[in-house]
Amino acid sequence: MKMKHIPCGAAVLLIALFTATALRAGDILERTISVHFDKTPLKEALAEVSRQGGFQWTYNAGILDEGRRITHVADGATVREVLLDMLGDAYTFKQNGDYLILKKRKKPVRQMGGYISDRKTGRRMANVTVYDRQSLRSVVTDKNGYYEIPVTEGSEIVVSRLAYRDTLLRVNRQTPRLVKLELYTDSLPKSATPSFRETMDRMAVRMEQFWVGSSQKLSTLNVRDSLHRYVQVSLLPGIGTNQRLSGSVTNDWSLNILAGYSRSNRVFEIAGLGNINRENVTGFQSAGLFNIVGGNVTGFQTAGLFNNQGGNLTGLQSAGIYNYTGGAVKGVQFGGVLNIAAQGRGAVQAAGVLNLVPKGEVSVQLSGVFNHAHTASAFQAAGVVNSADSLQGCQVSGVVNRAGYVRGAQIGLINFAREIHGVQIGLINYSRHGGYMVLEAGTNDVLPANAAFKSGVPALYTILSAGTNPEGASDRRLWAYGIGLGTRVAVSNWFGLSFDLLHRHLSEGAHADFVQEWQQLAMMPDIKLGKHLSIAGGPSINMLVTDPDRASASGIRDRIVARDLLDSSNNADGWLSAWWGWNAALRVRF
């Protein structure tokens, strides 16, 4: 198929027609016109406006006094400006294609409108918040920078946008219907990184995505004014007595049927679902699901699911799942699962699973699984793990305690420290500085082959012990295992004296499931042979407790007790024996 050739002149004409059509499309009220009316009848004036604006009128002639004379001069003004000056607040305009529909308001309302532009560039500015400090009514400028807001005499109208200076207008009888304003950029120096408050403002807007409408989020960012109301009631953010400026209002008393949104709250706030506060809360705050506070909380805060707070806590937080505080905590956090405090100062945390204080100091942490603190100054208790960079107090856990510097006590199955000034009580204890860890191979008057592991600190260490008599038939072989505590006194750099108290369970052949217990207190002087090696040996006092109903009890006693120190007349059934013994060992200290 052949393409028809379009002459150059025709192409230019088509382009001009399309361009003219595109220019005429869009918002009729924003088209610019120039008029000069001098006692011109209203009907003729409206016709001239429509001719220059390139649109058609549609209205009921009965709503106008078409013979009224108009005197008005405008050069390069918008259709909106000319019509508002000619007709006032009694009429409204609505565009439908190339038609402009004119209607009369049912109830006259005093309006103030106009355009907001940048002082430096002259460009009209969209998304500027315009609000009345008295009534809390607010609007946001449209894409053309136009606003319109109901006012009364005495209204204080504030024009606000982020990074620009606020402008305040007080409405009186002489205030014109149309007010054009130019905003100056904020001349205050800006830091390379946003301040905490600016960061929290933006964080709050993101966290409130579900709850807060877009125009209200713009107002939150734009409005820096501190508005105040003693009492407010809301259904949802923006649906309440604070209207769409709720994110910029500080309240004393708040009742939020579902969820509420405000700058701050001073005395009491309660919500069926959640409370959202951009800055600070003092007094009492309660919600069925959540509380989100960008600043500080001073008082009592409780929620069914979580509390999330950007600033400091002074008081008490309680939540069914977790509490998060981005600043310092001087108070108590109760969480069903998790508590996190970026900094602690005399804080108390109790959680079902986890407590965290990565900076600062915490006094008490109680959790079912894990605690971590930068500095723990009083007490940490966890079902599984306690961790602290510095501990001045006590750690108690079901499995592991870990700390850098310790001045106090660690009590758990396994205890680790970088430096210890105190005690460690557990099966395995280790400290790089100030600790005591020894592996010992030895013999005694009962079992010729013994091994022991000692760990803790010299003042108090734990002993894990095992020994056997390898000679004889397997069903007659005597063996034992046990646990104990000991202490060592350094008499000089090369000589020391240790006292070990041990409890062992004795068996002959198979493991004995009945009472056959050996208690021993041993005193062992030791001599250092090198940095890590020493030999020790000394006397012991021993006691054997056996089940008198067991026939084997007397046989065991005869094998290990050379001379019973107890009066046989007072021990006729043979259940208790005592004797003197000895120990010798080779020790390797780590």
Image (tube, rainbow, N blue to C red):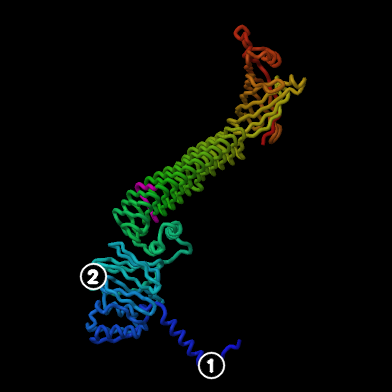
Callout 2: SS? loop
Residue 172 - label: 2
Residue 7 - label: 1
Describe residue 135's horizontal placement relative to residue 408 as left or right.
left
Residue 297: x percent and y percent?
39, 49
Mark nearer the viewer, 2 or 1: 1
Magenta run includes residue 280: yes
Q: Where 546 falls versus 109 (above or below)? A: above
Residue 578 - label: none
Q: Give the range drawn in magenta.
A: 277-287
- Evaluate whether residue 199 shows in this view: no
Q: How many neighbours does mark 2 have within 10 angstroms: few (below 14), some (14-19), or many (20 or more)?
A: few
Quadrant into which the N terminus falls: bottom right
Three-letter amino acid code at the position of disc 1: Pro
Q: How many neighbours does mark 1 have within 10 angstroms: few (below 14), some (14-19), or many (20 or more)?
A: few
Name which quarter of the figure residue 484 lies in. top right
Magenta run includes residue 563: no
Upstream in sequence: badge 2 or badge 1 = 1
Residue 443 vs residue 492, the one in the foreground:
443
Three-letter amino acid code at the position of disc 2: Asn
Residue 438: x percent and y percent?
66, 33
